[in-house]
Image (tube, rainbow, N blue to C red):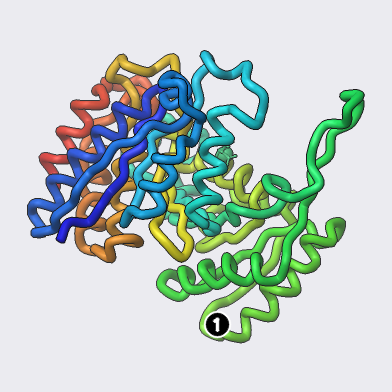
Amino acid sequence: MSLRIVLLPGDGVGPEVVDAARTVLTTVATRDGLSLAFDTHPIGGAALDLGLPSLPDATRDACVAADAVLLGAVGTPKWDHLPRETRCETGLLRLRQAMGVFANLRPARHWPGTEDSLPFKPERIDGVDMIVVRELLGGLYFGEPRGVAADGQSGVNTMRYTVPEIERVARVAFELAQGRQKKLTSIDKANVLEASQVWRATVTRLAADYPDVTLSHLYVDAASMLLIQYPKDFDVVVAENLFGDILSDEVGAIAGSLGLLPSASLGAGPGLYEPVHGSAPTLAGKDVANPAGTILSAALLLRHSLKREAAAARIERAVEQAIREGVRTVDVAGAGPSVGCRAFTEAVLARL
Ligand code: IPM
Ligand code: MG
């Protein structure tokens, strides 16, 4: 029986990078005797262009029923004037909610061969390998009440966290840490925010279930500095939605380019996999986008949704080898020569 993979190319460079990742997935699947059935659906501006909402019902239903979903990017200047309710980004947030993907894994590591484009001393980041686990369905993104007052003179959002919401994402983080260096850093602002006080108390209580994991806590302001100053000290980091959104971009600087960052969003059902970068409309259609973030997201899809660890690791090694050997897209090439999206993908395929 085939596993059903829904592809959501979306906007901007999305179609190019999803195409690259699909080619890699197909190659690996053929080799491993894994049968994948791909099904493509519109989301974001691509859906609005068809006269549909930014998350069409058919797209949502296909995603919820799939074995896994691979998304490119959403957002296009053409539809930036829309109110929040109908925007491209709202389509993505609704999809996360419909799929119940509450834990967003964002690995950030150093890729040897990208040193030229990095603002770090090599010895600071050599060997850095961390994962930010971002809570994805709570906090300020979804809390009620929210809105802009009728007179336009004030706006309000609500950061609310319940114990079950914190527990389920914290357990994902503890379990990940158990399979890695067994270090978990929980990030909050418990010196000021009540939602953070409940967060810290809950994570601390759960630690008793994971005696092999060393848990520490940091305030988000201190964490934002330490993550960059001493990135080697971190293994797994867990944070609420907005803190995780911000910190995962920050540690992305260690990889050297947003184009190298994959993500996995997990819940009880199918996982949603997407590069951390956006639609990059100015790069679209020019064969210059870096497909690595999406190819690496496909590796996460194999690891977490299809339980194919060996295949996932093989893709990661092929990307690592290509970059190490100097096959680099323009965003990580520094002053050196660069290749396009398709040539990078070919280089990965050749090293699988
Ligand atoms: C991300 C993005 C999204 C978010 C936007 C596009 C809604 O910044 O995936 O990090 O804030 O979650
Ligand atoms: Mg973000």
Residue 2 visible, this orientation: yes
| Residue 299 % position (x, y) | 29, 52
Residue 337 vertical placement versus 275 (above, below) = above
**In front: 32, or 321?**
32
Residue 110 visible, this orientation: no
Instruction: Answer with left or right where residue 208 lies relative to residue 321.
Output: right
Q: Residue at x 56, y 33 (%)?
A: 89
Q: Quadrant of ligand 1?
A: top right
| Residue 241 % position (x, y) | 64, 51
Residue 11 vertical placement versus 223 (above, below) = above
Q: Residue at x 39, y 26 (%)?
A: 331
**In front: 262, or 13?**
13
| Residue 352 % position (x, y) | 14, 48
Is disc 1 placed on a helix, strand or loop?
A: loop
**In front: 274, or 335?**
274
Q: Quadrant of the N terminus?
A: bottom left
Q: Which residue is mark 1?
A: 210
**Residue 40, picture quadrant:** top left
